[in-house]
Image (spheres, rainbow, N blue to C red):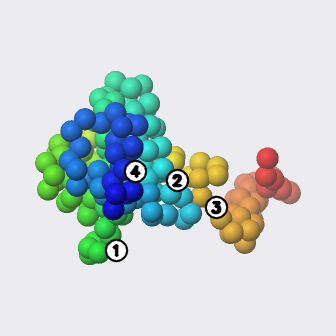
Amino acid sequence: EEEAYSAGERAVLETGLPGVAPQLVKLLGRLKYRYSFSQNVLQHSLETAYFMAIIAAELGLDENKARRIGLFHDIGKAVDHEIEGSHAQIGADILRKHNEAKDVVQAVAAHHAEVEPVSPYDVLINACDTLSASRPGARSETTELYLKRLEQLETIAHDFPGVESCFALQA
């Protein structure tokens, strides 16, 4: 419990977020011990927070709010094995109970398109979540899955008129 809390504190300090409730810090810390497709969920949340802030700044949006949404977007995964529902909805409910801003709660609920996006943050979190999860090296995959993906790429290329042969290569 102490180590989890400490991990949550480090994440909050790294992102520079003010006023994070102690219970939320604890839940963030629990993400250190969760993996999704071999990607550490706390590291993924930090990375998503950084992507959110960078892109929000370019778009003229509130960087701190974007960073907060990014860090909290998967907080429901800390308890989704204990509570019924999707991690997005569980996370939104947790944040609502801890008086997080309505647009933060909304973006967390919308990050897998389970609820209709209503703000740029709702769309941005979906994109940044995908960026972190799909970047090269983020998630390990078996050789079988990798080869299957290469075959799928070759099949797509073959569907274009005039393509006689193609080869998907790792570079």
The amino acid type found where label 3 is placed reads Ser
Reply above or below: 32 against 59.
below
The answer to which of marks 1 and 3 sits earlier in the sequence is 1
Which residue, as the protein is rendered here, is positioned at the far front?
2
- Expressed as whole percent of the image width and height from the top left, the position of residue 45 reads 42, 49
- Would you call the spot at circle 4 few (<14 residues within 10 Å), some (14-19), or many (20 or more)? many
Q: Nearer the viewer, mark 2 or mark 4?
A: 4
Q: Nearer the viewer, mark 3 or mark 4?
A: 4
Q: Residue at x 45, y 63 (%)?
A: 33
Left or right side of 16 for 154: right
Q: Nearer the viewer, mark 2 or mark 3?
A: 3
Q: How far apart in space, not on screen, are marks 2 and 4 (Cα)? A: 21 Å
**CB under 8 Å between discs 1 and 4:** no
The amino acid type found where label 2 is placed reads Ala
> For the residue labelled by badge 2, is the local secondary structure a helix, a strand or a loop?
helix
Q: Residue at x 34, y 74 (%)?
A: 81
Residue placed under numbered mark 2 in the picture: 133
> For the residue labelled by badge 3, is the local secondary structure a helix, a strand or a loop?
loop
> For the residue labelled by badge 1, is the local secondary structure a helix, a strand or a loop?
loop
Residue placed under numbered mark 4 in the picture: 7
Residue placed under numbered mark 1 in the picture: 81
Q: Residue at x 21, y 58 (%)?
A: 94
- Expressed as whole percent of the image width and height from the top left, the position of residue 168 reads 79, 55
> For the residue labelled by badge 4, is the local secondary structure a helix, a strand or a loop?
helix
The answer to which of marks 1 and 4 sits earlier in the sequence is 4
Q: Nearer the viewer, residue 119 or 1?
A: 1
**CB under 8 Å between discs 2 and 4:** no
- Would you call the spot at circle 2 few (<14 residues within 10 Å), some (14-19), or many (20 or more)? many
Can you tell which mark lies on residue 140? 3
Image quadrant holding the N terminus, namely bottom left
